[in-house]
Amino acid sequence: MNTNYRKPLTGTQLDYFDTRQAIEDIERGSYQKLPYTSRVLAEQLVRRCEPENLTAALQQIIGNKRDLDFPWYPARVVCHDILGQTALVDLAGLRDAISEQGGDPAKVNPVVPTQLIVDHSLAVEHGGFEVDAFEKNRAIEDRRNEDRFHFIEWTKTAFENVDVIPAGNGIMHQINLEKMSPVIQARDGVAFPDTCVGTDSHTPHVDALGVIAIGVGGLEAETVMLGRPSMMRLPDIVGVKLVGKRQPGITATDIVLAITEFLRSEKVVSSYLEFFGEGAASLTIGDRATISNMTPEYGASAGMFYIDQQTLDYLTITGREPEQVALVENYAKTTGLWADDLASAQYERVLTFDLSSVTRNMAGPSNPHRRLPTSDLQARGVAGQWHSPELDNWQGNMPDGACIIAAITSCTNTSNPRNVVAAGLVAKRANELGLVRKPWVKTSFAPGSKVAKLYLEEAGLLTELEQLGFGIVAYACTTCNGMSGALDPQIQQEVIDRDLYATAVLSGNRNFDGRIHPYAKQAFLASPPLVVAYAIAGTVRFDIEQDVLGIDKNGEPITLKDIWPSDEEIDAIVNAAVKPEQFKKIYEPMFNKDKGFSKAIDLKVDFGDEQNPYIDPLYQWREMSTYIRRPPYWATEGEGALAGERTMKGMRPLAVLGDNITTDHLSPSNAILASSAAGEYLAKMGLPEEDFNSYATHRGDHLTAQRATFANPKLFNEMCRDEQGQVIQGSLARVEPEGIQARMWEAIETYMARKQPLCIIAGADYGQGSSRDWAAKGVRLAGVEVIVAEGFERIHRTNLIGMGVLPLEFVNGDTRNTYQIDGSETFDVKGQTSPGGAMTVVMTRQQGANAGEQINIPVKCRLDTAEEVIVHAAGGVLQKFAQDFLEAASND
């Protein structure tokens, strides 16, 4: 700690660290030129960095240099229950490993405050048109997830610094925005900027408040939890100047889908973006959060907005204490984090986006950055010939492009009251005109916060949504995460029998193939009010701007413009109905630590009682659980143990893949089908099919989660082809040297039994999507040691390293096609790993006239920092921590 720069913060009992002075002592006049991100990163260096290393670290920031690593110490970790639980399962397994080697397991704890929100375990089995759908879905969630919830309850008391928000209370990102982030922290008498990492790629949601919040995988989160810094180099910081004003009738969703397309085209992958300008100043925090939330969809690491009056107004309306609001303003203005103080900030690159250019938009199919203007539905081949069956005789007659799912879901939109109120007003007008949802459309409304219910009730709009089938089914991440639940059996059978082009429309942020529902062939993103309109239309073949939704009582046609609310109407309701006391009513009891977790858990039986609490520092693993199982990362024998030592020699490809492979391809999160490898395993373990749940919920059990590796039915493994040479779609692999095509899991089992080292060859943007550590764990446990790709998404690359998998990148514009790789070859890696260093992959052809030929493929090592080289050499994050922990214990 550099006490020379510690000063009193005027008007408070707190101190702060004067980063401006520290920077000016090195180079006068440089602080005012620094972007917002640089100022926050510099502050934590001044506060946390060793004095002898401070000047060199700050010079990296001042000079916009990227040749030295420096430590970043996030203030807290936020987790949803899927990755948060698996991270804590890993720590529980680490305790076992430490204990077996003579260490004290009770000393293995998160040292950084860790907040776990149970929000990813509920499936919409009961749609929003059913009475008591919320209660029914919650009851199923508790029943299916009892093993998981039992473990999570144990972690609350067994681990220090872990707080849990129980199921049924909201989505991690929205709670983070509305309650958990103070924007400015006050600890141990010191004020400093709030920062966090979260086990979800959409953690940047809270960047809208000026909080650097980065999505990471569970493995990197574990590193931060355990007190190790996240080593980083100064990121590329790109300014995005927003100009103009949005047009009437345009929602924040329309804006963010246009921005996502624009920024993807500008190649901002892994950059930290800072939105500024008059356009940014005019956006509410709800609007800003919609943009920040979609950060992973445009490929960036952060989507920052400055602290300004909008920030203070939002903190006030969401029920933050006046003293905290005053602290945020005081600190920001004192330290140069207030918007007005960033007028001279300089960026290496500035992009300009005109808000007035935005029209009504959707996105899709298949990719969130594939913008689809609603005015172009006919021209793009989405809308077309369609018919509307008689509502009382639709069975067997569902239209082409039928919307089998219409969901208002995801923190992307429900954290913005304007979007939710707009949906309510569309429903109200539709009800007045006698419009109804089509009966084959499974509708649902899953807001990210319970506050949404209160202000909708206040505005009289909740009953309007319920009447149209959009009753509240959950406060959880549902459809957007593939937790759509079962379809009506008649609808599902018709989709199968007719091979119907069935679709989903949702107000989420992800629409990758195979993600939303196994029987929805494609999915489209849209604003909440547009989702309501599509539930009425019933098909994406409908031209939502032009076609007739129905006929009014006077025989006049009803189109979208007849039910679309004005901005003035939306704003009037938001201003009147959204109140600070609503947020306090919801969040004060939610954050009461004395509140129990789940009625499904008997604390007296499992954990002692209130008078004599006893928590064993070692978790008592349930032998037959398919949800929670002791992890195998330290084991050398048995099913699930790592497939031998890494030699990076004689590797065979498990898959040869194209561009845009997502973590949904690598480890899907949606419902488990009985015909899948995981489904067959669960049936063998005695689970009834109705309780198979989702892949996501079983990630605490490696024996189930392994069977999800490449289990996406939309996968195209170029090793598997038909007689005409066309790539076959499906979860398939080809076992070599026999050349036998098999289901992916059977191929993995075969290779595991042989202890065959594996690799993966891929195209560009490998690992897009969710921050899913099992996308790395699954391939590593299969025996994959190396992945050679044209490029990697940031979070997945970090997860691979955390599991001891080496990411290598083609250079000189080379691709898998340059070397005509077909998967029959074997591969060796030569050279020393170093940050960004040159290495060589030696490919040996095994078949054909050129059998035995060796080709040297130059590659770039994508271990980007010295710390990553060390972690990879240790075999991964957990192995490195165990080594360090035992070494430190032996030196005590």
Image (spheres, rainbow, N blue to C red):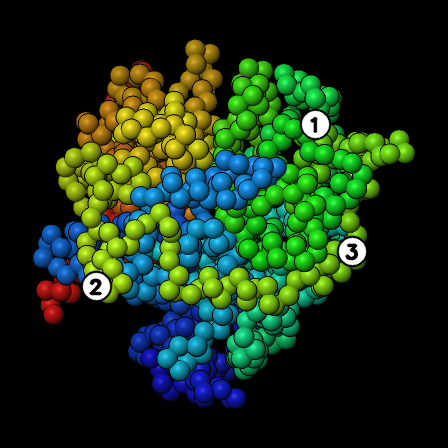
For badge 2, the amino acid type reads Asn
Nearer-N-terminus badge (1/3): 1
Q: Which residue is mark 3?
A: 569
Q: Point out the frontmost of discs 1 and 3.
A: 3
Which residue is at 42% across, 65% downward? 592
Mark 1 → mark 2, Cα distance in angstroms:
64 Å
Q: Nearer the viewer, residue 151 or 418?
A: 151
Q: Nearer the viewer, residue 127 or 887?
A: 127
For badge 3, the amino acid type reads Glu
Q: Which residue is mark 1?
A: 541
* Neighbourhood count class around disc 3 (C-alpha, 10 Å): few under 14, some 14–19, many 20 upward: few
For badge 1, the amino acid type reads Arg
On screen, residue 868 above or below 330:
above
Q: Which residue is mark 2?
A: 612
Say whether marks 3 and 2 touch (CB < 8 Å).
no
On screen, residue 144 above or below 80:
above
Kind of element beneath mark 2: loop
Q: Residue 82: which numbered mark, if any? A: none
Mark 3 → mark 2, Cα distance in angstroms:
58 Å
Q: What is the x, y in percent for residue 623?
A: 21, 39
Residue 590 at least partly seen: yes
Nearer-N-terminus badge (1/2): 1
Number of marks:
3
In the picture, residue 696 is in which quadrant?
Answer: top left
Which residue is at 58% across, 15% downward? 498
